[in-house]
Every structure is written in C-alpha cells, then in structure tokens.
Image: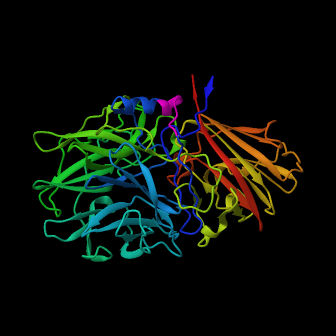
Amino acid sequence: MDNFPDTTRRGALTLGLGAATALSVPVAATPATRGVEGQRVADLGNGLYRNPVLSGDRPDPNVLKVGADYYAAFPSFLYYPAIVIWHSRDLVDWRPLGPALTKPLGSVFAVDLARHDGRYFVYIPVFVPPVGPPKGPPFKIYVVHATDMAGPWSEPVDMGIDGFIDPGHVVGEDGRRYLFLNDGHRVRISDDGLSRAGPIEKVYDGWAIPKDWIVEGFALEGPKLLRRGDWFYLFSGEGGTAGPPTSHMVIVARSRSIGGPWENCPHNPIVHTASRDEPWWSRGHATPVEGPAGDWWLVYHGYENGFRTLGRQMLLEPMIWDADGWPRARGGDLSRALPCPKAATAGGHGVALSTDFPGTTLGSAFAFFDPRPNYAARAIVKDNALILRGQGTGPAHGSPLAFVAGDRSYEVTIDVDLNDAGEAGLLLFYNDALFCGLGVGGGRLHLYRTGEEQRFPPAPAIQARRLRLRVVNDENVATFTYSEDGARWTKAGSFEVAGYNHNIGDGFLSLRPALYASGEGSAVFRTLRYRAFTKG
C-alpha cells in the first residue's frame, strides 16, 4: 500500500518574494513516522544520516563555517528571489534564512560565500544573454554584502569581472583578497571585496583526466580554497556537471602560494562516480569544511540514480587528511548510512510543503521562473489565499511560481479559482519549453505535455471556474486529475516525465511543482497540499 506522510521525505522548499509580499510555509508540528522521512528520523536517533542531507535541486553547494554556525547557498539559475541562505549547526539539519538576491540579473550560476573583516559576501556569476555579435562568454560577476547572513543584503554590485564563472574567495599569503575562477584563472579584488583590482591570470591547468574515461568534457570549474598549515589547497570540479553518470569528479591541488606552482594530489580524483550502477551520479563541485568536533567533511552535489528530474542534490561525505597532508574521502559510494558529524535530532530540518497561505509573512517557499522586474507584485496573500496576477498567454510565457520537490514520488493538490484570469492551473515545470500540467480557462480544460498544449483528443469543456487540481508524480510518471466537488476525481492525462531534465532541456534546472496564471486578471489559489509517498 502507499503511505502518505504530510511532510517532505528528505528536504525542504525554497522561496522568498521580497520584503512586502513574501510567503512562508508553516513547519510541520511533528516529524513523519512513516516512509523515507521516518527512516531519516530513525537514522538520526542512532547517530547516523543518509544522503542527501538536503534533497531536491541544491546544485553547486557552497558552505561557510563561522564559529559554530554553518551557512550554505546554491545557484538559483532563472528562479527569483534567488540564492536562499541556509543555516545549520551540524551539517545535517538545515533551515532556510531567506534570499540574498531579489533583483533579476539573469541566470545565477555557482556562488561563493565569504566572510572578511566581520562582513559577509556572496559572489554571484550571472549568465547575461548576449546582444549583438558575440564578444566572448556572456558572464558577469556581481557581489552582495551584509553584516548578517539573514540580511538585509545590499544591492548587487558589478565587479567588472566578465567572461568567467564559479568564483572562489581566498586571502593570499600577501594579505590581499582574490577570486579564483573557472578554467584555473585568478583575479585580485579590492580590499573591500567589491571590485576587480588586477588582471585575470591563468595559474592552474587542472588534472589530466584519462582519455578512456566517459565524461561530458574537461570543464575545470568550482574552485574552493582552503589554507591549512603552510599549504593552500584548491578543490575543483572536472568532467562536466551532467552528461554521462560518470562525468563529474572532485580533484585537489596544493601550493605554498596562491600564485602556484600547484601540485596535483597523487590520488585524484578524490570523489568520482565510477559506474552508472552507483546510487549517486556525477558527484562533484565540493567544498571542504571542518565539522563541529574538528573532523573534516566534503559537501558536494550529485544526481540520484534514475532521478535527474530532482536536480543535483546536496551530499555530505566524511574526509580525512593522510600522513602526507592530502585529503581522502571516506564515504564510499554513499549507499549506506554514515555517522553524523555530531548528535543530530529530527525536527529542525527543512520546511513543510503544505500551506493554507496564512497571512503576509516572510519566508522561503516559492520562486518565480525567469520573472519580469516587478515580479513580487504579482503575488498577494490575503484571507488564507494566494492571489496570483496573470502574465502572458499560458504557462510558457507566464513565469510560473514553483517550489522544489525532493521526493521520488509525491502528490500535490491545490484549489484554484479562476477569478478574472484567462487561465490558471498546476504544472510540473522544468522550463518554458519543457513542462506538463493541467489548467482551466475559456470554458474548458487545458492539458499540457512537453511544453505544448494537447490538441488531440481535445480537452473537455467545463463550466466550473473553481476546481481542485491534483498531480501524482509516481517515480517520474505524472498523472493529472481534477475535481469539481473535492470528492470525485476525473483523470485528465498521464505522462512519462523522466526526460524532463538538464540532459534533455539544458539549463541546469529541476522538475518542480508550479502554479500559473495567465491573462490580464488574477487567479486565487487555496489549500496547497504536498504529500510524499513510498511503496511498501
């Protein structure tokens, strides 16, 4: 039979909508006692944890340790508000603090967190679509800063560093501040950390991947630096972040100076998916971090075997330093439960995904896909309902409001009142060209698959303007149903969605439940329910 705990299986939901109109999702009062979430509770009770430590789309994780506190951030790509900051005390239980970036700049790639002279910084590479003839890679690096990781954060500052991604902050032996960049480059930045202060230099060539390895490409990226004793350690990703399951990996080099020369670790790569049979694919983009008890850990991402739709999820692996001063990963293929960094308890992790939209409170729950500059004004919470102003002529042009799902199987239901919108509904959304879903408008239902409305057979006419919509995603088979009375359900369609992932759709995204409203008016959404389920 199917078990439906009313909470997330392993992870949490990300959102914030700005200071005035952000929504929050109430935390479940008690942890689930069944299904995979129940297994997580049992593991923690025995001093163990299972990967992922933060499920769903948490790519390119970067972790900053400040005293007893840990902060994590992830690239948001085209979702805004962007760069939700997460907090932990043990590297296992994580809770969101809120977004660091609300102003749309473009597609946000892998970020870096830093603390210097009592101030916090987030270094943000952004893909900006080129206008006119190409003049090189269309990337810019911005920075936001704050005195507290919970914000408020400054407006983004253009650092004048163009054409590169994946910044990694470090203070050199000369006391100056630097950013390392993709492809082994480095640039000195100003003492205040807000601008470029020197030339961009090539200082590292990476590690030579054996020619017979099956990888997506060389792709030297994600530099994260650590000073330990007399050495600077440079942790990087290679092999490509997606593509074949055996692509991504973690390599290490060290030098007594950030200017090099850099010596590669003799047992590179220290993390690598060697076979498609392993539980986690394309493991890479690691940050080394000291644990609460002085032990060492690697935080990185990977795709769950067979579930690229969930995106790259945040993984935690123990690490040691060997007698020669090199790091060695000690988690194997992550197929088993591992000892926690320190005693961890359930109840302080993630955010419940069901909501009755209670009031205009701040939080971290939903994000708009590729929004216009005034996107926050589209969402108003009033009288236990979300009023979503329409945009565009359908889901592809409507900047849907989505949340991260971290479960292999789940059910989402939502009550939708068309109000005066042209069309509104519920989606499983990868991007504006790759989604499926069910909506209502113009006196009929609208059924979507692979980004297109299904014309044959035509969706039935329906006079109701208020419906309850439901999607059950059962291990990448999605079934959409609707009900006019909340009790009797009618099936609209079922779709295979395993291909709704980066290897097909590009963009480094994940498949997310989403709400949409199109046309000139607005739709009203009530009583969102998310239920993960396992079979057994």
Q: Looking at this rendering, what residue extends furthest in the front direction? A: 29
Magenta span contains residue 32: yes
Residue found at x 37% / y 63%? 149
Residue found at x 19% / y 71%? 176
196 is higher (above) or lower (below) than 380: below
Q: Quadrant of residue 297?
A: top left
Q: Position of residue 8 (x, y in %)?
A: 53, 40
- Left or right relative to 447: residue 514: left
- Left or right relative to 318: residue 98: right
- Left or right relative to 232: residue 271: right
Q: Position of residue 224 (x, y in %)?
A: 28, 56
Q: Position of residue 442 (x, y in %)?
A: 86, 57
Q: Specify whether residue 277 is in view.
A: no
Residues shaded magenta:
30-38
Magenta span contains residue 299: no
- Left or right relative to 9: residue 85: left
The colour scheme used to paint the residues is rainbow
Total marks placed: 0
Quadrant assignment for the N terminus = top right
Of 285 and 424, the residue lying toward us: 424
Quadrant assignment for the C terminus = top right
Q: Specify whether residue 289 is in view.
A: yes
56 is higher (above) or lower (below) than 259: above
Residue found at x 40% / y 37%? 51
Q: Position of residue 202 (x, y in %)?
A: 25, 65
